[in-house]
Image (tube, rainbow, N blue to C red):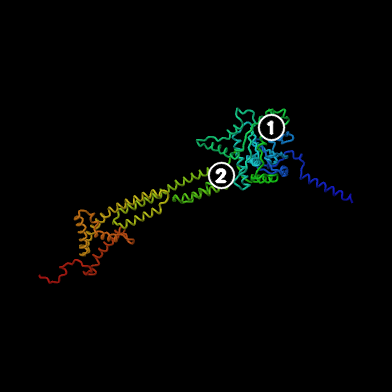
Amino acid sequence: MGRRWAPGICAVALLWLAAAAAGDPDPDELERAFPIVEPDYGHTKLRLSEQGLEAIRRIENPIAIVGVIGPYRSGKSFLLNQLLSLSCDKGFGVGHMRDTKTKGIWIWGKPVEMDVDGTKVSVLYLDTEGFESVGKSNVYDDRIFALATVLSSVLIYNLPETVREADISRLSFAVEIAEEFYGRVKGEEIAFEPAKLLWLIQRDFLQGKSVQQMVNEALQRVPNDNGNKYIDEVNQIRDSLAVMGNNSTAFSLPQPHLQRTKLCDMDDKELEPLYVTRREQLKQVVGSIIKPKFVQGKTLNGKEFVSFLQQILEALNKGEIPSTGSLVEIFNKAILERCLKVYKEKLEGLRLPVPVEKLQQIHEVANGEAKLLFDKQHFGKHHAVQSILKLEDEITKVYKNFLLANEYQSSKLCEARFSECEDQMDHLQVLKLPSMAKFNAGFFYCNRTFVMECVGPAKERYDHRMSKMLLKSRALFIKEYNNKLFNWLVTFALVMVVLGRFVIKFFLLEIAAWVMFIFLETYTRMFWSAESLYYNPAWHIIVSSWETIVYSPLLDLDRWAIPIALLLLFWLFYWRCFARRKRGSRSVLPLYKNSHKNSSRPRSD
């Protein structure tokens, strides 16, 4: 019976041991470098490596990451081995060929346990693929750079010789990308908790300046009193590093030995003594600034850190990001153009001219829509401040152009209406039959049309001109009105005398015309001037009668005077020549009669 169960018991025991080994790996197996992020075939995107992730997931303590970034062949892997007190054959792989040894991002499997402010923290050291190597796209370098920036608690920027402008630009760009995609993952405006930045300059001579002075001078804003746009771009790059500016320090490290290809074969006794001393000091500096990685105000254990890494990498791979050489402003340039197009389309929908208040209102609405679109699509937080200022500047320029166009169109329209009114007032000054009623009707129509159609910023100016012109025309018309009317009435009286005497032969009409003529002529001579006549009540009765006859909404005698006169002449001619012959000598009017023709006395001869 015992023999029958023996094989089964052995199998169960082997499975249990295997499971135990899988759940709690041998610490010695973790003392090596594991890839956690690898490049895809085209070196454009990144993918996770399960080997390194399994090594991280088992950590239960809060995690801190010390990451090293820098150009390829700058000694990042060797530096990490020195910080971990490991030889090249046991630590990170160190390559001496021209191609890069580290691909993607690697992490040392066994964390260094440290006490940070009374909390036990597991410190992981992270090695990154160097940038500027051949066969890669700039976008790939930027993703590696940005991922290391957002993951690290302490970020060591390993630079040979000195700080170059390209190094500052690349770091600021990586900070922008990391901040942007951290914000996308978390869905908050606060981008990410910046790492402690350590500028590590590997050089032997500093020419009397400390490395901190050299870094400070390199990061200092460049004076730009003349407003040079290229200097503005340089300063914008420095402004984007403000998020890490208060958390940065600088450290110099001399070359360990002149024969760099043999460094892995040397021990501390063979290295430069100053290098060994500075290396130990560097370890102390790194240890003093290490803090656990905080996300949303809390530390991350191994599983939480892996989940965070997955989210960030997914956002980086999905997001369309620019390359370092273009900078964020250039990437945002297309977005600025789209926002500006939205603004222009809104204003171009207006039919100029319009009142200034309406243009201002549409401007504010379009400006709000453009900025809302920019907020949704812009890239980078700190450069976005400069980009939004640029957008505001461009919008201001477009708005000023629309203001000028509105001013021009308004002036053009108001000038046309003003000229029309001016011509109309000139025409009313030379009426054939002077009529105050017609002048007032034309005056009010012109003024009403101008008020309705003259709009825009020029309206106020032309209102003043219009008022002066109308008042001047009215005063001139009133001044000439009485004189013209007096002359017309005198002429009319004489015409009626002639018609009553010789054409119609209606003596009552002739008498009335003579009375009117005598009154007009004698009154002015009796009082020495025609002006005194204009205050006489009889004159006002005459004027009222004249106005009623000359102009009304139904009949404008000034327009129809000639046709009516011709028609009357034709009627008189017809009546004189034909109508009287048909009817005989009888007439309904008291006409002048020939006495000898009507006499019935017999002839005396």
* Of the image marks 2 and 1, the number of the one nearer the N terminus: 1
Helix, strand or loop under label 2: helix
- At which x and y percent is residue 207? 60, 27
Above or below for 79 versus 527: above
Helix, strand or loop under label 1: helix
Q: Residue drawn 84% across and 47% down?
A: 10
Compare residues 487 and 466 and report the one nearer the observer: 466
Compare residues 388 and 284 and report the one nearer the observer: 284
Camera-near label (2 vs 1) is: 1
Above or below for 439 versus 378: below
Which mark, residue 422?
Answer: none
Q: Amino acid at mark 1?
A: Glu
Q: Which residue is mark 1?
A: 280
Q: Does residue 9 appear in the picture of this structure? A: yes
Q: Which residue is mark 2?
A: 334
- At which x and y percent is residue 411? 41, 48
Q: CB under 8 Å between callouts 2 and 1? A: no
